[in-house]
C-alpha cells in the first residue's frame, strides 16, 4: 500500500514490478495521455517497455519530458475563447503552431517511481540497461509506503561497467566496486536558480539534473525531488564538450583509472570526495 502522502501521484496501491512483468512486453503500448490522469502508475508500463526495447530517444533527459506533455492545436484553444480574445491573441497564435498544456507528471517522478516500485533484480536489470545512456540517476529516493523514509539505491547500482576512451585504449570501471573519486556539490543560501542550473551548463544535456529550468517545472517541482539525490559519472557522453576537453579528458589522459562521479548532496561524504560549494546571495556564517 502506498502512503497517503503519495496518493495524488501514484494512487493508493502500486503493484510491485517483478521479473515476469518486466520480461513479458506483450503488445506495443502507445504513449500515455498524461493530461487526464495524475497517476504515474499509468505511465510505468510504457516506460518499462521503452527501457526493455532500448527506446533511446526517451532515455535522454531533454527528450524524456516530450513524451509526458500533451499538445493541442491553437485552433482548439481559440474555439474556447471569446471573440474579444481572438483579436488580441492572433499575433501569438501565428508564431506558435502548438500550445503546451499543463504537464502533471515530471521526468524525475517517473524514474524514481520506476525504481521504487521494482523488485531488486528488476531494478538492477533496468539500471544496467539505461546506464548506457547519458542521464542522471536517483541514488536516494523516498519510500512509497513509508513517508519520511528513504531508499538508498547504492546496492542496486553497484557493478555495471562504465567505459571511457584514453590514448592507451578503452578503460573500464565497475561502478562503486573499482576505485572512484566523487565531486559533491553543496549549496549554501537560497536563490531561484541554484547549483543544479549552473551544473547543467557543463553537461551534455541542459536537463541532466532535475532543476527549476526543466520543461514543465513552472507548473510544480517533482513530488519526489525533496530529499532525493541524483548522480552521474563524468565521461565524454555525459560532459559538455568544453568541460570534457578542458577538465575531465585531461584527468583521464593521466592514465587515471578512478572514475569521477558527480553527486548533488552531502550524503556521500563517507566516501573519498571533493566538495564544490555554491554560495548563494544572502548566505550567512551559519
Image (cartoon, grey):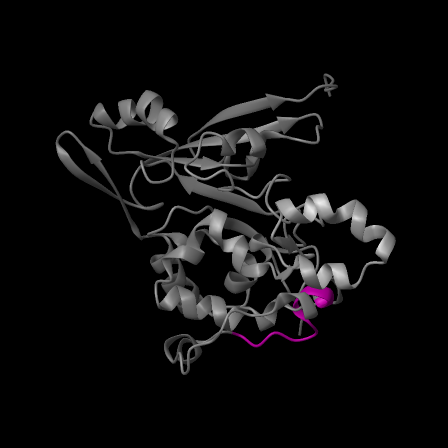
Examine the image and state in which quarter residue 285 appears: top right
Q: Nearer the viewer, residue 30 or 24?
A: 30
Apparent side of residue 227 relative to residue 45 in the rendered image (left or right):
right
Q: Nearer the viewer, residue 143 or 12?
A: 12
Q: Quarter holding the N terminus?
A: bottom right
- Residue 243 is situated, as x and y percent measured from the top left of the image, at 38, 26
Highlighted magenta segment, given as a residue range? 7-16
Apparent side of residue 108 relative to residue 8 in the rendered image (left or right):
left
Examine the image and state in which quarter residue 163 appears: top left
- Residue 86 is situated, as x and y percent measured from the top left of the image, at 79, 52
Report the residue at 72% width, 20% height from top.
283
113, above or below 185, in the image: below
12, above or below 207, in the image: below
Residue 152 at least partly seen: no
Q: Nearer the viewer, residue 268 or 70?
A: 70
Q: Quarter holding the C terminus?
A: top right
Report the residue at 43% width, 64% height from top.
123
Amino acid at each position: 500500500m502506498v502512503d497517503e502522502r503519495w496518493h495524488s501521484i501514484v494512487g493508493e496501491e502500486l503493484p510491485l514490478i517483478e521479473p515476469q512483468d518486466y520480461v513479458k512486453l506483450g503488445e506495443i503500448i502507445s504513449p500515455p495521455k498524461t493530461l487526464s490522469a495524475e497517476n504515474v502508475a499509468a505511465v510505468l508500463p510504457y516506460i518499462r517497455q521503452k527501457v526493455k526495447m532500448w527506446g533511446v530517444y526517451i532515455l535522454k533527459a531533454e527528450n524524456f519530458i516530450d513524451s509526458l506533455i500533451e499538445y493541442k492545436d491553437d485552433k482548439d484553444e481559440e474555439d474556447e475563447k471569446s471573440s474579444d480574445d481572438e483579436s488580441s491573441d492572433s499575433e501569438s497564435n501565428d508564431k506558435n503552431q502548438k500550445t503546451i498544456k499543463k504537464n502533471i507528471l515530471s521526468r524525475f517522478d517517473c524514474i524514481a517511481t520506476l525504481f521504487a516500485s521494482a523488485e531488486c533484480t528488476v531494478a538492477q536489470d533496468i539500471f544496467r540497461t539505461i546506464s548506457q545512456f547519458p542521464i542522471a540517476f536517483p541514488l536516494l529516493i523516498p519510500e512509497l509506503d513509508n513517508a519520511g523514509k528513504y531508499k538508498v539505491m547504492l546496492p542496486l547500482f553497484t557493478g555495471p561497467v562504465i567505459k571511457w576512451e584514453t590514448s592507451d585504449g578503452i578503460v573500464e570501471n565497475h561502478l562503486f566496486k573499482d576505485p572512484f573519486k566523487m565531486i559533491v556539490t553543496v549549496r549554501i543560501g537560497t536563490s531561484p536558480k541554484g547549483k543544479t542550473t549552473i551544473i547543467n551548463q557543463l553537461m551534455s544535456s541542459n536537463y541532466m539534473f532535475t532543476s527549476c529550468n526543466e520543461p514543465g517545472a513552472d507548473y510544480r517541482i517533482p513530488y519526489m525531488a525533496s530529499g532525493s539525490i541524483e548522480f552521474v559519472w563524468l565521461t565524454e557522453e555525459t560532459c559538455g564538450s568544453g568541460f570534457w576537453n578542458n577538465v575531465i579528458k585531461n584527468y583521464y589522459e593521466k592514465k587515471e583509472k578512478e572514475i569521477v562521479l558527480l553527486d548533488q548532496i552531502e550524503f556521500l561524504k563517507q566516501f573519498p570526495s571533493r566538495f564544490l560549494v555554491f554560495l548563494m546571495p544572502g548566505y550567512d556564517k551559519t
